[in-house]
């Protein structure tokens, strides 16, 4: 029999061929287990000429065939009551979490039990959800290089010296009491948050360093980061034939989930490890192997633990806000497809909120008539700042363009994309290194150019009435080095008539 905490519970048994008459898939086998009599349902078997090998799972795995169609919402106890209704099993939650969860449907009972972030065990048709096992004070010592004990001791994540940090301040190093148990110090920078009951109180650097020192000490205690990660696989049957077995015989009374104090002889450190799996001989009714350590962490475990930590941080912030002031209202909601956090200052008429959805993050801050809003997706960032309903500015960015929108007197819009810059209902200026405006397009669409030189200028429309014509017409003085024109006028007269009038005026004609 192979059993793992909140995981497999399988049986392999071999029968003589004359004992196999009633053996078939879906039949039940009753065997002696550490917890007492247990039923196992056959799901496969291999038959030879003289024997039959049977593969079976604990009967409670029948719950894998119980489909849960709709979403289930409630506390863990309420969820147990819902999913176990009509199955012949009852549920009992023994943990301390009281938050409301929503579990998506289109699944089965076993999948839901595995997703509840809790350990579970099933005894006498009762599903017990929460921490499995207990600490009965069992103590064993390891580090004697016995062939029948596999020791996996990892110090990869050990921390024995903390440099506590707050913003730009680095506090004095704080050492673990185990720092000299290792060949070298394991140093890390750890960031901490510091809050005061009164917002207007500013702490000195020395006060901050004193607080950081206490937080580092608390960190060692709460995380046990100064201890190695230990895993022990004890081969009980083989070990029972040695003289050292007397030191490990107490493990015969350990059940799944129980805590054992493991003394590490080489490091002189005690670690609390749990029975996370075992192999059991159903004929001799004794353990074959016992594994002490921590459950193997999967990617899903890390995601769930990270989400759990985020929720805890938010809950702590909520408690702190309610304790320090009654002006703030903090709401954290976890729904099927989103997490929402909002903080409202009702007296100041101010609110900040964040929504984390599938593929999108929304942020919003409002105060009186002002509002700032931002949406982030994998393809676009959009943000908007507004004052009331009449005035706002908005920016949108994606892989193709930047777009700036202005709502108000001008209703302007500026777009920057692969085609260049487009300005609607607005102005545009070009300023040189001296700070002079070289060219300006005003909101009327008029172009004003100063301090500008052109290597080439082509005027398309030179007809009478054109802007170019009017410009030359209204000039007091104009000089031309070479002029290729068949018709010229001065003072409104054709140049030929103008010359004749001048000559006559001078008496030359």
Image (cartoon, grey):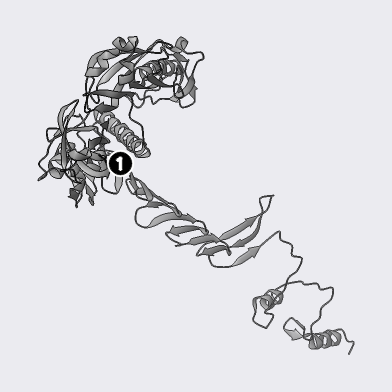
Is residue 446 left or right of 349 when viewed as pictured?
right
Q: Is residue 436 above or below residue 307?
A: below
Q: Which residue of the protein is positioned furthest toward the bottom in this rendering?
A: 509
User: The C terminus lies in which quarter of the figure?
Assistant: bottom right
The residue positioned 67% from the left and 77% from the top of the image is 470
Residue sitting farthest toward the right:
508
Crowdedness near tag 1: few (<14), some (14–19) or many (≥20) residues, C-alpha within 10 Å: some
Q: State the residue at coordinates (69%, 50%).
A: 433
Q: Name the spot of residue 79 as percent of width and height, x first.
A: 17, 41
Residue 484: x and y, percent?
Answer: 81, 81
Residue 197, above or below 340 = above
Viewer-proximal residue among 336 and 83: 83
The spot of residue 285 in percent (x, y) is 21, 24
What residue sits right under mark 1 in the picture? Answer: 341
User: Which of the image's four quarters has the N terminus?
Assistant: top left
Q: Is residue 307 visible?
A: yes
Q: Is residue 74 left or right of residue 190?
A: left
Query: Which residue sits at x=72%, y=74%?
Result: 458
Quick check: 89 left or right of 188?
left
Q: Is residue 47 above or below residue 475?
A: above
Mark 1 residue element: strand
Looking at the picture, tell me which residue is in the foreground, 196 or 216: 216
Nearer to the camera, 168 or 176: 176
- Rendered position, 507 above or below 380: below
At 16% from the left and 32% from the top, the residue drawn is 38
Q: Quadrant of residue 56?
A: top left
The picture places residue 330, in percent across and down from the top left corner, at 26, 37
């Amino acid at each position: 029999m192979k059993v793992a905490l909140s995981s497999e519970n399988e049986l392999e048994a071999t029968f003589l061929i004359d004992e196999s008459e009633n053996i078939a898939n879906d039949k039940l086998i009753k065997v002696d287990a550490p917890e007492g009599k247990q039923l196992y349902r056959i799901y496969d078997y291999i038959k030879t000429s003289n024997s039959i090998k049977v593969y079976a799972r604990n009967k409670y795995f029948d719950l894998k065939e119980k489909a849960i169609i709709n979403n289930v919402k409630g506390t863990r106890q309420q969820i147990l009551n819902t999913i176990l209704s009509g199955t012949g099993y009852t549920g009992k939650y023994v943990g301390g979490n009281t938050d409301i969860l929503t579990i998506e449907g289109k699944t089965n009972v076993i999948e839901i039990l595995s997703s509840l972030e809790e350990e579970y065990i099933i005894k006498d048709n009762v599903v017990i959800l929460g921490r499995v096992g207990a600490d009965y004070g069992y103590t064993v010592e390891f580090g004697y290089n016995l062939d029948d004990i596999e020791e996996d001791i990892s110090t990869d994540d050990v921390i024995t010296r903390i440099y506590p940090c707050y913003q730009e301040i680095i506090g004095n190093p704080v050492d673990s009491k185990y720092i000299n148990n290792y060949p070298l110090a394991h140093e890390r920078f750890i960031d901490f948050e510091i809050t005061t009951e009164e917002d207007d109180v500013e702490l000195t650097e020395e006060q901050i360093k004193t607080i950081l020192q206490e937080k580092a000490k608390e960190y060692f205690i709460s995380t046990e980061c100064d201890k190695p990660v230990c895993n022990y696989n004890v081969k009980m049957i083989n070990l029972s034939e040695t003289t050292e077995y007397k030191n490990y015989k107490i493990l015969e009374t350990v059940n799944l989930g129980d805590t054992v104090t493991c003394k590490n002889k080489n490091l002189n450190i005690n670690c609390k490890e749990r029975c996370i799996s075992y192999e059991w001989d159903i004929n001799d009714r004794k353990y074959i192997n016992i594994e002490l350590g921590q459950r193997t962490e999967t990617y899903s475990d890390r995601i769930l633990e990270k989400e759990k930590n985020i929720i805890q941080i938010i809950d702590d912030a909520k408690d702190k806000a309610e304790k320090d002031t009654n002006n703030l209202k903090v709401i954290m909601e976890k729904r099927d497809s989103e997490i929402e956090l909002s903080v409202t200052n009702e007296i100041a008429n101010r609110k900040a909120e964040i929504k984390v959805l599938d593929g999108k993050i929304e942020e919003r801050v409002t105060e009186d008539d002002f509002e700032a809003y931002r949406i982030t997706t994998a393809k676009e960032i959009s943000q908007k700042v507004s004052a009331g309903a009449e005035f706002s500015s908005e920016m949108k960015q994606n892989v193709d363009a930047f777009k700036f929108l202005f709502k108000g007197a001008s209703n302007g819009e500026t777009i920057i994309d692969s085609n260049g810059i487009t300005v609607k209902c607005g102005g545009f200026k070009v300023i040189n290194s001296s700070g002079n405006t070289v060219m300006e397009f005003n909101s009327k669409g008029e172009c004003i150019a100063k301090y500008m030189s052109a290597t080439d200028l082509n005027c398309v429309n030179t007809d009478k009435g054109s802007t170019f014509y009017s410009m030359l017409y209204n000039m007091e003085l104009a000089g031309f080095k070479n002029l290729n024109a068949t018709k010229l006028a001065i003072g409104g007269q054709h140049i030929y008539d103008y010359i004749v009038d001048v000559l006559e005026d001078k008496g030359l004609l």
